[in-house]
Image (tube, helix red, strand yellow):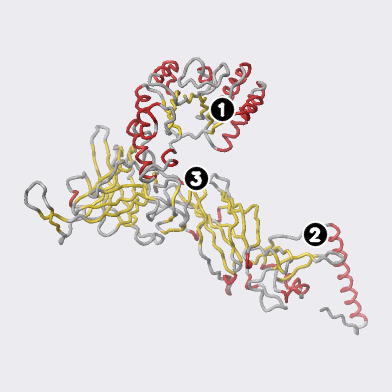
Amino acid sequence: MKTKVLGTFITEWDEGKAICNKLLSTKESAHMYAELLSELAVALGFDGWLLNMEVKLELGQIPNLKEFISHLTQTMHSSLPGSLVIWYDSVTIYGNLSWQNQLNDKNKPFFDICDGIFVNYSWKEDYPRSSAAVAGDRKFDVYMGIDVFGRNTFGGGQWMTNVALDVLKKDDVSAAIFAPGWVYETKQPPDFQTAQNHWWSLVEKSWGAVKFYPKTLPFYSNFDQGHGYHISVEGGQVSDAPWNNISSQGFQPFLKFTGNPSPDTIEVFVDFKEASYRGGGNITFKGTLEENTDFTTIIFQGELLMDAVPLHITHSVKSEGDSLLGLSLHFSSAANERTSVLLASWGTNQFSRKFSKIIAPCQVNKPRTAPGWAVLESSIEMNGYTLTEIHAVCYRPKHEHSQLRLEHRTDGSEDTLTYSPKEYHAVLGHITMNTSKENTYFPPSSSWLVEGHYIKWSSGSQGSKTVSVKIDWKSKDGTDSQFPKYNIYVEKLPKQAVRNHGVGLGGVQEYLGVANVEAFYVSELPIPATTSSIKFIIQVCGVDGVCQNMDDSPYFQLDVKATTVGGRKMFQLFSYVERNNLVNPWAHSTNGQQLLGCKSHGKLGIRHFEWFDSLMCERSKAVIRGLLQSTSRMEIRELLRLPSRERKIWVIMILSMVFVILLCTLSNGKWGKETLVFP
């Protein structure tokens, strides 16, 4: 079952009345706007519409309203199979704005021509049952509303939302939960993450889990929730800025809400402040744990049918001291036989009787992995079994010299010596499951076409600049990309990066963000005055979370554009393929210099070339000769487009110069006395 995202089309108050008058003026108008809404939904990538007409309508407008609903439903289904159009319980078939709080004969005609109805929140306990009876075999298309804020809603909403859910489950209709953001908006204690887990645990307790995963392979999760306080890649932090990006959500762990944890238990939570392996989230395990004991908690419920191909599991762990963290996989056979397998590196003697099999993962030494993180790989073959659960196993091994403490007995018996519990702290960074141990194949950078559009430069202080640019990329062979995301970096290359022997000095790779499509917009990126070129790197990432090596990634390079020189607007004409080799007879070297063009407002308005160096500006004629001798080492990036009149003047001047040179040559040959000297 795919999660669907609907747009809301709402009309209310006087403005909404005016919109409805235009929308419902004719049958043709109703059809036209329905088609436009369908086109909008397809173009923007959402899955249908919730129609909320909260204005009083004329009785004569109802036929066209039905046309609008019916035509929108049909066009959505034809243009986007699986899409939904849901009617909100507001206007009746008589045009009255009268919330029915149930499905009845006053709103059923609208229900009959779309995919379902969102019933208003103020229903009574018997309304779900009567609505199901009216809907017949479409009872699951009746979504009874629950306002989490508790405004005149059955059960009171808030922390009693499950009361209404229990009734709806009993009467076999669907639920429409409105405003679950109540937890965040009202700052429920003790903190958002704890309160959020608590509230959704009530929903899960009433209706159970809707989805189970892993269900297919490959399976990957870094536990991101689409927001955080930092970004990490392979355990190394690349950004410390707070962020929100719902496209970066990963599969969420199935963590049981335990209320107020006692000091002697392990607290388990998705953490956004603790160091992450990839992205901005992780699962943190924190508390106290005695030696030779363990703590186990479920993190995923699955429905993954295994075959003869081995299952390869990779996970990353960061822990303190002797805090150890393993994974246990639980399988079920067709005959309902249960098998559990522990993946743990060492100190596993205490588990010999708890698991059917113990596998010691291999630690993978990856050069890009940040210190402190361990990347572990395991393989297992369970043909015919179904993976039903994945657990995290926290444990501490028994040490030869353990610290003891005197435990006071309150029942009057003698005090006893027990092992002293120690603080436990471990982090699970990610988990990947696949059928292949082979690394993800990334096409070489040369197979991508990367372009920059809408480039805009602005001047800053002390010679600095800002640049805005839209970067997009696609495969040169025209195939659609199968990669889910791209990390975007910028490398600001300093002017001194151009050295002898054609060797460039690389700059620092600065993380800009992530793209989930083949485009990224950079807005007003600061560029220091010492920068000569900027390189935007598109790091391709696979479905298993692995990213391409930065040096092999496609990129877009942009030379820094000079904006003003001495108050005159300038623009770059050329970039050098081999800057250090571009030498002319009138300058020792042009290393680091930019060839610029400016308009000279003389009588003829002729444009000419100038070097950035003011001394060289005086030798523009000579420089042109040097350029003509060096064109094999240059790449023209932008050409001056001269007006027609100026082109004619240039042609006349060139022809005149050719004529003069020819005349001088003939003169020298004939008389042999006069000599023309060019400056």
Identify the residue at image location x=60%, y=34%.
40
Q: The residue under label 1 is which amino acid type?
A: Ser
Label 1: state its secondary structure: helix
Q: Is 589 rendered above or below residue 472?
A: below
Badge 3: how crowded within 10 Å, few (<14), some, or many (20+)?
Answer: few
User: Where does the image place residue 312, in percent across and percent down from the top left?
Assistant: 34, 48
Residue located beneath label 1 in the image: 78
**Sooner in the amino-acid sequence: mark 2 or mark 1:** 1
Q: Is 162 rendered above or below residue 96?
A: below
Q: The residue under label 2 is which amino acid type?
A: Leu
**Sooner in the amino-acid sequence: mark 3 or mark 1:** 1
Label 2: state its secondary structure: loop
User: Where does the image place residue 394, in percent across and percent down from the top left?
Assistant: 26, 50
User: Where does the image place residue 630, in percent across and percent down from the top left?
Assistant: 70, 70
Q: Indicate the quadrant where residue 134 lies.
A: top left
Q: Indicate the quadrant where residue 397 lies.
A: bottom left
Residue located beneath label 3 in the image: 482
Residue located beneath label 2 in the image: 642
Depth order, front residue of 147/317: 147
How far separated are the C-alphas under marks 2 and 3?
45 Å
How many marks the image carries: the answer is: 3
Depth order, front residue of 276/75: 276
Label 3: state its secondary structure: loop
Depth order, front residue of 109/626: 109
